[in-house]
Image (tube, rainbow, N blue to C red):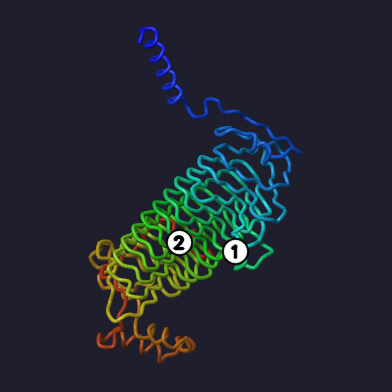
């Protein structure tokens, strides 16, 4: 081969290598869609990596995104499906949908009609700053990796009964999903998660739903900075392990603030549960750490049941709950081994001024146990006979019922701003 041919071959190989290393979007185009034109037509014309920009207006069509591209609204244009099927269906990787009003999906629960339905395998989807309104499901995400759902407003079908609605965000069998800064209301469950891995849920606000979160079988994940209020239930975390549940607020919920059911090896810290039916509902939970939580103004501060033991419960505040702990078991459970918890109904003293009580705190007694077994007893709770039974049971250990105990209860709350949550209830 001549020197000239060798040089030409080397130059060609170098050019191919340069093309391979060039950024994917270097030749990307921007296609503009104006009112009266078709978004679907623009998507068909677009090449992978292009951007389709939609100008203000209402576009009555259903969209399929079947190639990697960006679909962006200018001034929040509306895409309305006319109450049929999905408004937008995604079946490609590397799709971004941003800045749209997406509304009026169908209402077929079997078909899972959604504002945005992300098909299996559509990895690295980004859905941001969209308003999804009057859809059955807001966003349906299934078998996707690396999804980011951020800053969306999702409002469901207020005209339908709760059980007939879809969920705000449905996450099923995904990896590395991030759900951040969304506001969700008037759906069935705000965020429904099942069989996923390594997910993060941060700074979402959910209200007026059945459960703020309905979360199962999704391990090694984080719930942080979320607020759930005025719903039937707040955070429901079930059949999971290795969770971090931090800095969440659950207030004014009819049933529970935070449910920990069949959960292991998790950290639940610095959460506020205020004015709920039950602050914490802890069921079949072991080897977890609960610390720094404020449990205030609930009908029951903690409902502890189904063998929930071997947990570290330190440094929490239990303030002005009508019933601090509801607990029925065959033996005591000790809390506050490392740092005592504060109990607003503690009647002991601190003679050595070390900040901790000198006598143990006992959450329940014989009267409490009888009350749970025979609810009509509440009619007699203020009677002299029942009050005498309560006094005698606490004086004689043989009559004492198993209870949550705290041997060194704190004399003052750990929280310095607990008063702003006192009296917080549902409207």
- How packed mark 1 is, by other alpha carbons closer than 10 Å (few <14, some 14-19, many 20 or more), is few
Dividing the picture into quadrants, the one containing residue 315 is bottom left
**Residue carrying label 2:** 215
71 and 243: which one is in front? 71
Which disc is residue 150 wearing? none
Residue drawn at 65 percent across, 48 percent down:
102
Q: 89 above or below 106?
A: above
Q: Quadrant of residue 292?
A: bottom left
Crowd rating for badge 2 (residues with CA inside 10 Å; few <14, some 14–19, many 20+): many
Q: Is residue 370 above or below residue 411?
A: below
In which quadrant of the rendered image does the C terminus lie?
bottom right
Residue placed most toward the observer, 358 or 179? 179
Left or right side of 8 for 156: right
The one nearer the camera, 190 or 174, is: 174
Q: Which residue is mark 1?
A: 110
Return the x and y of residue 226 as percentages of the image width and height. Answer: 48, 54
């Amino acid at each position: 081969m001549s020197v000239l041919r060798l040089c030409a071959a080397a130059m060609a190989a170098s050019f191919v290598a340069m093309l391979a290393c060039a950024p994917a979007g270097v030749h990307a185009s921007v296609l503009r869609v104006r009112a009266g034109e078709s978004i679907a037509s623009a998507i068909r014309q677009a090449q992978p990596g292009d951007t389709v920009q939609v100008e203000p207006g209402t576009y009555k069509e259903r969209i399929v995104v079947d190639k990697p591209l960006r679909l962006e609204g200018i001034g929040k244009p509306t895409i309305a499906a006319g109450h049929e099927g999905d408004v937008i269906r995604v079946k490609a990787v590397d799709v971004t949908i941003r800045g749209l009003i997406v509304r009026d999906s169908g209402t077929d629960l079997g078909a899972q009609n959604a504002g945005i339905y992300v098909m299996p395998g559509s990895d690295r989807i980004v859905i941001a700053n969209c308003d999804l309104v009057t859809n059955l499901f807001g966003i349906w995400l299934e078998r996707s990796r690396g999804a980011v759902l951020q800053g969306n407003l999702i409002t469901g079908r207020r005209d339908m009964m709760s059980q007939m609605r879809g969920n705000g965000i449905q996450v099923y069998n995904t990896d590395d999903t991030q759900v951040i800064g969304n506001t969700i209301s008037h759906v069935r469950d705000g965020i429904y998660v099942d069989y996923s891995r390594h997910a993060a849920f941060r700074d979402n606000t959910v209200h007026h739903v059945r459960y703020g979160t309905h979360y199962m079988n999704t391990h090694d994940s984080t719930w942080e900075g979320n607020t759930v209020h005025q719903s039937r239930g707040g955070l429901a975390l079930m059949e999971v392990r290795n969770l971090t549940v931090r800095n969440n607020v659950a207030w004014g919920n009819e049933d529970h603030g935070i449910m920990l059911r069949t959960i292991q090896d998790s950290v639940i810290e610095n959460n506020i549960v205020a004015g709920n039916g039950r602050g914490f509902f802890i069921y079949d939970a072991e080897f977890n750490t609960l610390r720094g939580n404020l449990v205030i103004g609930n009908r029951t501060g903690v409902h502890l049941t189904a063998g929930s033991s071997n947990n570290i419960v330190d440094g929490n505040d239990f303030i002005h709950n009508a019933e601090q702990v509801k607990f029925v078991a065959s033996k005591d459970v000790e809390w506050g081994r490392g740092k005592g918890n504060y109990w607003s109904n503690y009647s002991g003293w601190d003679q050595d001024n070390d900040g901790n009580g000198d006598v143990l705190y006992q959450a329940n007694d014989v009267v409490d146990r009888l009350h749970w077994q025979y609810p009509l007893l509440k009619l007699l709770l203020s009677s002299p006979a029942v009050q005498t039974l309560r006094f005698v049971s606490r004086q004689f250990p043989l009559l004492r019922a198993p209870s949550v105990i705290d041997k060194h209860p704190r004399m003052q709350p750990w929280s310095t701003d607990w008063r702003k949550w006192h009296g917080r209830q549902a409207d």
